[in-house]
Amino acid sequence: MTLLIKICGLTTPAAVEATVAAGADMAGFVVFPPSPRHVDLARGRALVAPAKGRLQVVALTVDADDALLDDIVAALDPDWLQLHGKETPERVAAVKARLGRPVMKALGIAEAADLAAVPAYAAVADRILFDARPPEDATRPGGLGRAFDWRLLDSLDPGLATMLSGGLDPTNVAEALRITRAPAVDVSSGVERAPGDKDPDKIVDFVRAARAAAATAPAAAGPRA
Ligand SMILES: O=C(O)c1ccccc1NCC(=O)[C@H](O)[C@H](O)COP(=O)(O)O
């Protein structure tokens, strides 16, 4: 099975092209104004157009209401919605039913207790993305370049559709995959020159490192794409 690789927080056509050329599978577009990676809907629409059919487009929001989600779907026509806020399992189910698209739910992890919510979310989401839990005073819940203790995921059912995220970069993704055997990885800060400014060389390095690691330490059994 092939490792699924998502590059998140693309803000320019050059970053989209670099993500395609590097051989990533998914491209994330952040619709959340406080983020340095925020793209408004007009910009998002223009950015995703050349990605269609070459990458799975992921539209990322934080506690968005139905009106905003409808606007995002109309503008970006995403393959996936990523819910990165405090959405409950009931809200995840409602979003999925309303929009008829696969939903990825992000969970912030800092300690074993944070995994208690996994079964409830796994019952309704199409994939669970594990990210580092942000500090209380963070201005955004993701894209912070923070890692968590990957060994916390040891007890998870390997058959779950998951994605490992948080503080990954070209130098540590192999070790993260060795420890977690995750079926999918996601990166933002680790392939940037500065917040919101993707570095094409780092995207290539990340994809290369992740693919090489997956070839030597295949992911645990479970769904990939
Ligand atoms: O990227 C952002 O600015 C962002 C803002 C608000 C919510 C989520 C955000 N990013 C979510 C992602 O999927 C990131 O790729 C993930 O948090 C990992 O980020 P990083 O640790 O910087 O690689």
Image (spheres, helix red, strand yellow):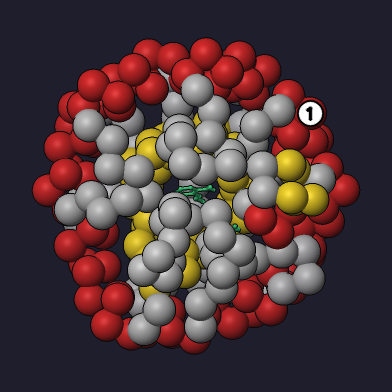
Q: Is residue 169 or residue 178 the one in the foreground?
A: 169
Residue 210 on image: x %, y %: 72, 62
Q: Residue at x 44, y 14 (%)?
A: 75
Label 1 is placed on what type of residue? Ala
Asked whether, in this view, residue 130 is left or right of residue 29, the answer is left
Residue 66 visible in the shown view = yes
Q: Is residue 182 left or right of residue 115?
A: right
Q: Quadrant of the N terminus?
A: bottom right
Considering every residue shown, the one lying at the far front of the view is 137
The image position of residue 83, as x and y in percent, is 34, 45
Quadrant of the rendered image containing residue 215: bottom right
Q: Is residue 93 rendered to the left or right of residue 29? A: left
- Near mark 1 (Cα within 10 A), the count class, few <14, some 14-19 or many ≥20, is some
Residue to which mark 1 is pinned = 14
Give the x, y percent position of residue 223: 44, 56
Q: Secondary structure at mark 1?
A: helix
